[in-house]
Each structure stands twice: as C-alpha cells, then as structure tokens.
Image (tube, rainbow, N blue to C red):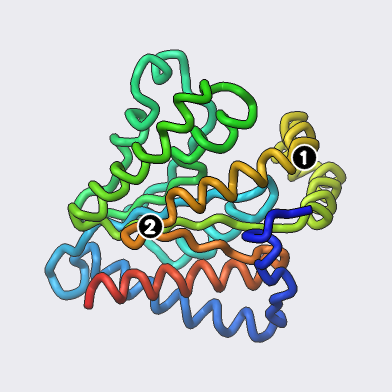
C-alpha cells in the first residue's frame, strides 16, 4: 500500500484529447513569450536563471513532459541534462559537485532529467551511499537549493507519480515496441520489485526537502496528457510570479 502522501494524489485526473491539444498550444505560446523575456530577447533585459528538475517513477513520462515544454523554444535558448550513476571521477567529489557546471546563469534555462535527489532515492535504496551520507544529504540539498534561489534562480521541482499498475502497463508496451525497447532495462524491472522501498524514500525526500523557497510539485501522471499540461502551467505560474 502506498504511503498517504502518494495515495492522496488524484490519479484519476484526465483531459480529453481535443481539450488537451487546444490548451497545449495556448500554454506553449505563453511559455515561449516568458522564455524570450527571461533571455532578454523580449524587453531587452536579461531575467533570472530558470532551472527545472524532473524526478519520477520509471516510465512516468518525464521525457514527454520535457518535449512538450521545450517544443516551442529555439534550441539555443535551453539545455537538457540527464544524470545517471556518477562516474569514478565524480565519486571523488562531493555528490553535488557534478551538477554545478550545468546550473544556468542569468537569462539561461536548464532542465535536469534526474537530479541530485538520486542521493536520497536510488543511492539510498540500492545501498550505493552509506546511511550517514544519504541522511546528511537532506540538509545539504536544502542549503544548496536555498543558495540557488537566494541568488535569483527560479527553481521548479517536479515528481511524476503513477500507479504500479500503470507503470507495469507502460513497461510491457515498451517491451513490445522495437523503437522504444531501448528505454526499458533489466534495472527498471528490478526496481519495480522494490517499489515499497522507493515509496518510503520518495515520501521522506518530499517531507524533508519541500521548503518555502523550493517546494515540490507532485504531478498526477497516470494520464500523460494531464501531466504535460500540469507541468507547463506550473512552470508558467512560477516564471510569472518571479517576474512580478
């Protein structure tokens, strides 16, 4: 049984295709204008950095959300960084070290597909980090994010939530599609068997790192259309609030 924090997410939320397509075009146009304003292409004044973090269950639709978010943008105006297991060189440094070079500067925009939260998720669950290390990481992450936001960064954190049943359906769909089989690994199936452990880690992660300066947005991603619009609208609201 899922922890109450996740079980309270309304996964029944849906959008009809026609409604989705209309809203998608409108929101993408809104975001394009905001992105150009942040970059100084509109108004002539460079705005604050925009950093968007994506975490979520395997097959929750992070890639699809990122594609819809960036579809209207000039590819020169943003970057996407995907983070997996740290390399041997990266392991010689503090776990946050490898993320710093990609943090955007004034007027920049970056999206992180997987993030420093790997320390308290996969590294915790799979035993890649010691208990003292991952427990200490909560405070380190709070300080790190506080530093970024205090310096002006618009920091948006998403966790995409889907049910175990829907995840299994998406895994099986990928397994049957020759053009999407590469997305599915033995590790993905293995992680499914430890869903309860990951749920506990997710809940503690949110409880300990959901702050006023850097709140979490848990996205009901059972239906991909709903999740994509939710992400777009949340980003738009956050940027508008930052620009005043």
Tag 2's secondary structure? loop
- Rendered view: 90 above or below 18: above
- Rendered view: 109 above or below 103: below
Residue 230 x/y as whole percent: 54, 71
- Residue at the spot x=34%, y=62% of the render? 212
In this rendering, the label closer to the viewer, 2 or 1: 2
99 vs 175, nearest the viewer:
99
Among the 4 quarters of the image, the one containing residue 182: top right
Residue 27 x/y as whole percent: 47, 78
79 sits to left or right of 26 = left
Mark 1 or mark 2, which is nearer the start of the sequence?
A: 1
201 vs 93, nearest the viewer:
201
Is there a contact, CB below 8 Å, between mark 2 and mark 1? Answer: no
Q: Residues within 10 Å of mark 2 (few under 14, many from 20)?
A: few
130 sits to left or right of 37 = right
- Residue at the spot x=64%, y=56% of the render? 61
The residue identified by callout 1 is 192
Tag 1's secondary structure? helix
155 sits to left or right of 178 = left
| Mark number displayed over residue 180 | none
- Residue at the spot x=30%, y=60% of the render? 154
Distance from label 2 to label 1 (Cα)? Answer: 29 Å
Residue 147 x/y as whole percent: 23, 47
Among the 4 quarters of the image, the one containing residue 44: bottom left
- Residue at the spot x=62%, y=80% of the render? 21
- The quadrant of the picture occupied by the C terminus is bottom left
Residue 28 x/y as whole percent: 46, 74
The residue identified by callout 2 is 211
């Amino acid at each position: 049984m899922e922890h109450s924090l996740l079980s309270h997410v309304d996964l029944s939320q849906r959008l009809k295709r026609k409604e989705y397509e209309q809203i998608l075009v409108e929101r993408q146009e809104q975001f394009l204008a905001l992105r150009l304003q942040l970059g100084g292409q509109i108004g002539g004044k460079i705005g604050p950095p925009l950093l968007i973090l994506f975490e979520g269950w395997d097959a929750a639709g992070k890639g699809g959300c990122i594609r819809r978010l960036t579809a209207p943008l000039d590819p020169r105006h943003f970057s996407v960084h995907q983070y997996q297991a740290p390399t041997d060189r990266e392991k010689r440094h503090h776990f946050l070290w490898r993320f710093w070079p990609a943090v955007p500067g004034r007027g920049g925009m970056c999206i992180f597909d997987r993030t420093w939260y790997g320390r308290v998720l996969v590294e915790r669950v799979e035993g890649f980090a010691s208990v003292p290390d991952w427990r200490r990481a909560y405070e380190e992450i709070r300080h790190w994010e506080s530093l970024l936001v205090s310096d002006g960064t618009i920091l948006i954190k998403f966790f995409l939530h889907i049910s175990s049943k829907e995840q299994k359906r998406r895994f099986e769909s990928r397994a049957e599609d020759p053009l999407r089989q590469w997305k599915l690994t033995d590790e993905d199936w293995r992680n499914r068997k430890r869903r309860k452990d990951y749920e506990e880690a997710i809940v503690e992660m949110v409880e300990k790192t959901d702050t006023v300066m850097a709140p979490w947005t848990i996205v009901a991603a059972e239906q991909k259309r709903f999740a994509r619009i939710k992400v777009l609208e949340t980003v738009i609201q956050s940027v508008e609030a930052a620009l005043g």
